[in-house]
Image (cartoon, rainbow, N blue to C red):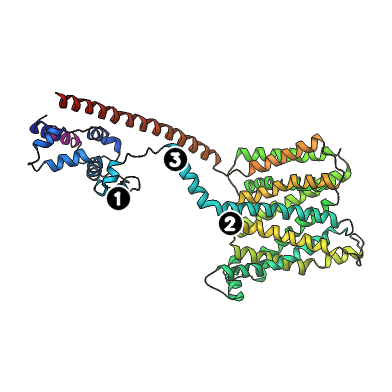
Amino acid sequence: MGIEEFRNKRNRSAFLGMSRPPNVSPRRLSDISPQLRQLKYLDVDESIKEDLKSSRSVEDINSASIGLTSIEERILRITGYYGYQPWTAIYNGDERPRENLTAADAQAPAAPDTGGQRLTRCCLKLSASQARKICWGVAVLLGVCSSWTGSTQLAKLAFRKFDAPFTLAWFATNWNFLFFPLYYIGHLYTSTEKQSPKQRYRECCRFFGDDGLTVKVFFTKVAPFGVLWTLTNYLYLHALRKINTTDVSTVFCCNKAFVFLLSWIVLRDRFMGVRIVAAILAIAGIVMMTYADGFHSHSVIGIALVVGSASMSALYKVLFKLILGSAKFGEAALFLTILGGVNFVFFSFVPVILYFTKVEYFDSTDVPWGNLCGVSVLLLTFNILVNFGIAVTCPTLISLGIVISVPVNAVVDHCTSEISFNTVRVIAVLTISLGFLLLLLPEEWDQWIIKLLARLKMRKKEEATEGNVDAGPGLGWSRRARSSMSNFTH
């Protein structure tokens, strides 16, 4: 190939690239893929280079034969390809500029970047960046499971001497006073801008409106939630007097299904078929749990009390989102502290009335204060982890802690009491647990699966394309080597 033929060929390629009308500019690589493909396999013989050493065009020929990157950059700048960033191609960690290559780099063979090495690198990066978050997530999960299981078992044990579920619920709810003080201690420890308790209180009161916590806001937006909170705890503890802890903790998991149904009806949330299936499984598990004991009066009343507790919990969550929306950590701590005040001010007369009417009678000289304080501390810990654990982990792990408490309670009940875990009860537990796990699926779970499958297909196509491209230049190099060797021998 002579000099004039090479120049004619280059001018012809440039003319073909500019044949597009001037008012139309290619915006995709596919519009200029034929030109790029020709430039990729462009080769210049050594004899032409020797003949053109004295010519000024030898620089262009050397640049064309040395690197495809500079030519691609010029074409992409001229065509105006969207999203093109030349600095990422130049300063990429895997592709260094050729002028920075040392002699050792030029002589050393390039190590093949296999898929196993990339996977190992990604795993190491993942474990290094998210190990702390995973550890915190596991700690929160175990804390939620142990606190919820421990409070349930201690409450069941306390009822042997202290047959007063409402008094126990009232006593445990009063410990909500500690939410805001504990939050403020954490604020002083972690925040860079320290605020006084009064300043922090005023800032958190903005959650209730521009006027803060007024009397009207207190009776319309706070007091109803105090009633729902007390009813949830009372019905749950009252159910422990009727049935075992395994059945109570299992049926209470249905509150997740009730939250979905109420959110779908009241909040007009997105309809999801898988969550409808989960709600049906939860209801079926409740019926099977009732049937496991033969529809005895204690069993039916106990299951009904737990269902009522789960319903009050779901109503509390849905109304909170409807009326108050979402709250920050300080606002949630202040709100829970106010609920403790509502419980102490407005419900303190109820335990007194129940005691003197002997509806809830207990010996005042033999009160198991250890069990009562243990239940209160564990419930306080559980509520702290549920409300503030999202700062260090995802909500799914927190919900899994509640599910794991079901088999833990079953093991404790099997070891400490004579409970027959028949086939119907086991199937009911598994059914409710499966429904609860289905409710933990995110709203976009189906789209995530579709995107994951699409990415896997694209990765397979890219690997196949890279294999074909790697095989092409290798064959061309071997052919050129053979031709040059034959020319040398002759």
Whether residue 34 is visible to the viewer of this picture, yes or no, is yes
Tag 3: amino acid: Gln
Q: Quadrant of residue 391?
A: bottom right
- The residue located at (24%, 45%) in the rendering is 77
Which label number is shown at residue 64? Answer: none
The residue tagged 3 is 117
Q: Of helix, strand and loop, which one carries label 3?
A: helix
Query: In this picture, is 144 found above or below 38?
Result: below
Q: Is residue 461 left or right of residue 386?
A: left
Could you tell me residue 228's position as x and y percent?
A: 73, 58
Whether residue 243 is visible to the viewer of this picture, yes or no, is no
Q: Is residue 186 left or right of residue 365?
A: left
The residue tagged 1 is 87
Magenta-highlighted residues = 11-20
Sequence order check, earlier mark of 2 and 1: 1
Query: In this picture, is 361 found above or below 85?
Result: below
Chief secondary structure of the magenta span? helix
Asked if residue 14 lies in the magenta stretch, the reply is: yes
Tag 2: amino acid: Val
Q: Nearer the viewer, residue 24 or 192?
A: 192
The residue tagged 2 is 392
Sequence order check, earlier mark of 1 and 3: 1
Cα separation, mark 1 vs mark 3, equals 26 Å
Cα separation, mark 3 vs mark 2, equals 31 Å
Report the residue that reaches farthest toward the front: 489
Tell me the quadrant of the picture where the C terminus can be found: top left
